[in-house]
Amino acid sequence: MNKVEETSEAVADEKRVLMSPDKMSNIQKRPSFFQMDKELPLEPLVTLWKRERDCSALMEYILRRSYKSELYNQKKIKCHQAVIVVKGPRKSDVYMQDGTISYIEVTTKVLMSNPWLVKVSATVYLNMLYFRVYLHRPEELKLNSQIKKKLKRLLPDEKLKKMTTPSRDLKNNLNIFWGALQTIDEERLNDEFDLI
């Protein structure tokens, strides 16, 4: 078995456990585009997202595209850069996909209006682009392992688990997100928030 086949098989194994609830039946049919080889074309990822609404493909596409066009000295961040938003009274903490923390000024109304940001507790919003669920435990969220590794310094396992466990009253927000996935516009990941 060559290296590409091994990687494809490992990805398939992980995706059997972690994926949107309705995608399990398609796992054997699809090729794997999820290696971190920056030279592979991005178009197959977009096609996979558009055809099957595969969040993993969209995430990989966005991460690889942003890798090529990182901007520094920004005054705004895009929604796709945010993994977890903790809403505060004056400023909100944003745990970013690059492993850093930023602070934004944003209203609850703006956060609630973005379909990618799901409210899981009184103050925590998760960017569902980076999260999956266990097939037999649809209310237990799993952060993408690459992103989790980057955020480890800011969010040790215990703190991450506490932040990403939906409250009893808001568990249904996950079902609403998965139910709407077929119609969610990926362009909303480009919504911008003002940095403080």
Image: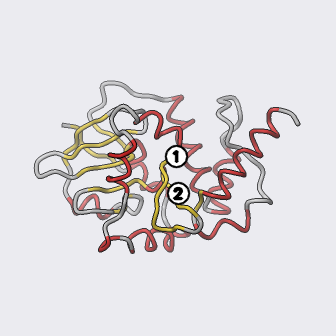
Q: Quadrant of residue 35?
A: top right
Quarter the C terminus occupies: top left
Q: Residue at x 33, y 35 (%)?
A: 154
Mark 2 and mark 1 lie on one chain; the one further toward the N terminus is 2
Callout 1: helix, strand or loop?
Answer: loop
Q: Position of residue 113 (x, y in %)?
A: 31, 64
Q: Is residue 57 left or right of residue 72?
A: right
Is 139 placed left or right of 110 in the picture? right
- Name the amino acid type tagged 1: Asn
Q: Is residue 21 above or below residue 64?
A: below
Could you classify mark 1 by the number of other residues whose Cα lies within 10 Å: few (under 14), some (14-19), or many (20 or more)? some
Q: Residue furthest right?
A: 1
Q: Residue at x 46, y 54 (%)?
A: 187
Residue 140 vs 158, above or below: the answer is below
In the rendered structure, the answer to whether residue 182 lies left or right of residue 96 reads right
Label 2 to label 1: alpha-carbon separation: 7 Å
> In the rendered image, which residue does mark 1 sit on?
144
Residue drawn at x 29%, y 43% as measured from the top left? 94
Q: Check disc 2 and give the amino acid type.
A: Arg
Q: Which label was assigned to residue 85?
A: none
Q: Which residue is mark 2?
A: 132
Q: Quadrant of the N terminus?
A: top right
SS at badge 2: strand
Which residue is the extreme one toward the top?
72
Kindly check if marks 2 and 1 are in contact, taking CB atoms under 8 A apart as contact.
Answer: yes
Q: Is residue 71 left or right of residue 91?
A: right
Q: Position of residue 23 (x, y in %)?
A: 65, 66
Horizontal and vertical percent position of residue 166: 35, 64
Q: Nearer the viewer, residue 165 or 72?
A: 165
Local packing at callout 2 (Cα closer than 10 Å; few below 14, some 14-19, many 20+) is: many
Q: Nearer the viewer, residue 24 or 42?
A: 24
